Image (cartoon, rainbow, N blue to C red):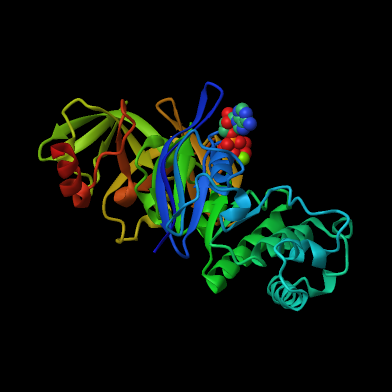
Amino acid sequence: MTTLAVENLKKNFGSTQVLKDIDMEIGTGDFLVLVGPSGCGKSTLLNVIAGLEKQTAGQVMIAGRDVSNLQPKERDIAMVFQSYALYPSMTVERNIGFSLEMAGVDKAVRAERIREVAELLKIKDLLKRRPSQLSGGQRQRVAMGRALVREPQVFLFDEPLSNLDAKLRVDMRIEIKKLHQRLGATIVYVTHDQIEAMTMATKIAVMKDGIIQQFGGPKDIYDRPSNTFVATFMGSPAMNLLSGVARKAGSEWVVDHGSQQVAVPRHIDVSALREGQEVLLGIRPEAVHLTAEVAHDDRIDQVWEFERVIDVTEPTGPATLALFEIDGTEFHASLSGDAVVEAGHSYAFTADLAKALVFDALSEQRIAHVDEAGASEADQAA
Ligand SMILES: Nc1ncnc2c1ncn2[C@@H]1O[C@H](COP(=O)(O)OP(=O)(O)OP(=O)(O)O)[C@@H](O)[C@H]1O
Ligand SMILES: [Mg+2]
């Protein structure tokens, strides 16, 4: 069932268009993550859904009801902000129960709901304290508790973990994911942390300049980004993009990049390529290995082999990042943590092309895969 739908939504601040024709819908139990660079309109979209900002045009539907012109409290949503916004003079207990108190919910029912939520969030021992007597992570839990106690149709989170240290962020990320699984809640969650996006989402909307660039499951967004913006925004280090020219060599297609010649991967629909077309070849850092380490791995089918002198190495523990240049383009390889490599030395590399992508250099759109070819022809016909 569709729990939240946003239709033809526009938002201007003065003459600036901050949201341009946003269309999306999510079902009950979906965890939608809005990601994108600073200033792309994530918080504005969330605030319009919440009713804290008024849309310039378009609709917001919650559980089949047009809420576009309703007050925030009439929308059946609960919001958790980056700043938590707890009432400093109230105890944790009262902070959590305050919205129920305002709604005139009976004291005994209120106490029972607070107890349930406190148990769920493991903050039972903190109920008598005030926000100033809590750590950042504990305050974050209280802010969550305040939202959970209301059992709304949709939870809205705006970067709720960004004030926490790295370790606590990871812990809370898992806690929120567990809560989501347990409650089956419908969530819209803003972050610019792409690890949070990939790990928590059932759906991701990647935004740029007030436009949704792509809406889909995390795996689709990662493996089949619709354009170079999405491709390089998701993933760290970013996907390598090598510019080159597509050319037919016998029965195969290749991309000429400077002195290098790389086979166009077999999963690419070459009927969409033109002889001489300027393209960008997309290769993720984790697809690049030391040839010495893959020499006997026959699962790797189609490859591009090259030699390069490494400029910089960055051992991170689980991986060793190597940076080098290929004909003037910076290129990242994410090698195994055990790889023994040194800056200033030359190595043979093997790039696995199983997941490589090809983009048109001009439009920056991804060239379709063979299994999408039917769909793209239908699009062209339409
Ligand atoms: N009340 C306002 N008046 C005028 N412009 C605004 C207002 N609120 C936001 N903006 C502008 O709208 C754009 C989108 O802002 P928004 O806060 O939605 O971005 P964001 O994606 O949440 O960014 P961040 O990741 O930095 O939080 C920005 O250019 C911002 O300056
Ligand atoms: Mg924001």
Which residue, as the protein is rendered here, is positioned at the far front? 104
Residue at left 52%, top 40%?
Answer: 36
Image quadrant where residue 149 sits: bottom right
The N terminus appears in which quarter of the rendering?
bottom left
User: In which quadrant of this rendering is ligand 2 seen?
Assistant: top right
Residue at left 81%, top 67%?
Answer: 93
Residue at left 26%, top 50%?
Answer: 302
Looking at the image, residue 171 sits to the left or right of residue 223; the answer is right
The C terminus appears in which quarter of the rendering?
top left
Image quadrant where residue 172 sits: bottom right
Residue at left 53%, top 66%?
Answer: 185
Residue 359 in the image: state x and y as whole percent: 31, 35
* For residue 293, above or below residue 284: below
Residue 280 visible within the image: yes
Which residue, as the protein is rendered here, is positioned at the far top? 15
- State the residue in front, 238 or 314: 238
Residue 188 in the image: state x and y as whole percent: 53, 54
- State the residue in front, 60 or 202: 60
Residue 210 in the image: state x and y as whole percent: 48, 34
* For residue 372, above or below residue 126: above
